């Protein structure tokens, strides 16, 4: 297919990486961000950021990708719909996709489809972007996406290195994210908070502590709107984690190496399988 004209709204880690990856392939890509710093950095990477508003940016676009924090998606999507041609494919990269979580009205929800790349960084802003961010990643797209959305999404995400596109309902996506995205964030935050309470010098830790607390460096503003999407599911996930921590504590207290080994090997098998997938 002829490469479409793509507009990326939001030039942080996700949007900036997408714009950089597409620009590197000579795709007609434009960007817009309310952040002057992000716009300046994007311009230095050859990305067209001349538009002065969301409305002017999306004029004439074939594909609009909204890559802003979840709490801003509704406002940006409404602005994009007002000016984008009726044939424009409009998607958002939010970490939640259900209408209620995003506070979308019926018209906006009907027009805008979630397409969430499972990639990112604990850092934010264009400075956290990189052109190879999506290599090997999975993109979770709403199953209600029509053909006119699926075709450009297949082209766009595979062209920037995504390994797999998965289609699922918005609610199913949000439940999965509560387990595989929001729970790890909270676990890393809890672990780093525990270290901080013990006044452990962050300059004295090894790679294990650094790796396991990486997500704790994420901005709270980046996460605040995501954590309430599926509170019951996230609550169950936290209880599952607490239960396993209690099992470990009990096994250590009773010197039960059989229980520890059972948990250890189960976790090891899961992690090895994840490494093979990557």
Image: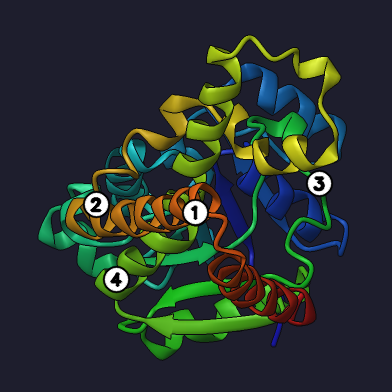
Residue 192 screen position, x and y as percent: 58, 27
Tell me whether the residue at label 1 lies in contact with that at label 3, contact meaning CB atoms closer than 8 angstroms: no
- Residue annotated with mark 3: 130
Q: Are marks 2 and 4 in contact (CB under 8 Å)?
A: no
Q: Which residue is mark 1?
A: 254
Q: Earlier in the sequence, mark 4 or mark 1?
A: 4
User: What mark, if any, has residue 263 been given in the picture?
Assistant: none
Which residue, given by chain and number where applicable, does mark 4 sit on?
A: 170
Label 4 crowd (10 A; few <14 / some 14-19 / many >=20): many
Instruction: Give the x, y percent position of residue 4.
Output: 64, 71
Q: Nearer the viewer, mark 1 or mark 2?
A: 1
* Comes first in the chain, label 1 or label 3: 3
Number of residues whose C-alpha sits closer than 10 Å to that of mark 2, classed few (under 14), some (14–19) or many (20 or more): some
Pair 2/4: label in front: 2
Quarter of image, res 221: top left
Asked whether disc 4 touches disc 1, contact meaning CB atoms under 8 Å apart, the reply is no
- Residue nearer the viewer, 48 or 166: 166
Mark 2 or mark 3, earlier in chain: 3
| Number of other residues with Cα within 10 Å of mark 3, as a class: few under 14, some 14 to 19, many 20 or more | some
At x 35%, y 56%, the residue is: 243
Q: Circle 2 sits in a helix, a strand or a loop, which is it?
A: helix
* Above or below, comparing residue 111 to residue 220 in the picture: below
């Amino acid at each position: 297919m002829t490469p479409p004209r793509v507009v990326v709204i939001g030039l942080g880690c996700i949007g900036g990486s997408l714009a950089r990856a597409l620009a590197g392939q000579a795709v007609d890509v434009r960007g817009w961000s309310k952040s002057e710093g992000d716009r300046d950095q994007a311009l230095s990477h050859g990305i067209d950021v001349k538009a002065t508003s969301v409305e002017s940016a999306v004029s004439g676009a074939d594909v609009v990708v909204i890559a802003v924090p979840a709490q801003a998606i509704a406002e940006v999507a409404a602005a994009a719909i007002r000016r984008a041609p009726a044939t424009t494919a409009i998607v958002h990269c939010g970490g939640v996709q259900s209408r209620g979580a995003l506070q979308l009205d019926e018209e906006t929800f009907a027009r805008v489809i979630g397409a969430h790349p499972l990639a990112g960084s604990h850092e934010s802003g264009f400075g956290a972007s990189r052109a190879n961010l999506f290599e090997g990643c999975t993109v979770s797209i709403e199953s209600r996406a029509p053909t006119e959305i699926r075709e450009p999404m297949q082209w766009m995400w595979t062209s920037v290195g995504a390994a797999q596109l998965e289609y699922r309902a918005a609610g199913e996506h949000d439940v999965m994210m509560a387990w595989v995205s929001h729970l790890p964030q909270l676990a890393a935050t809890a672990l780093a908070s525990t270290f901080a309470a013990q006044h452990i010098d962050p300059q004295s830790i090894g790679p294990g502590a650094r790796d396991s607390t990486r997500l704790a460096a994420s901005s709270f503003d980046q996460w605040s709107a995501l954590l309430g999407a599926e509170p019951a599911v996230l609550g169950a996930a936290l209880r599952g984690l607490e239960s396993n921590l209690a099992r470990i504590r009990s096994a250590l207290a009773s010197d039960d190496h059989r229980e520890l080994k059972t948990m250890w090997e189960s976790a090891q098998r899961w992690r090895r399988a994840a490494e093979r997938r990557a």
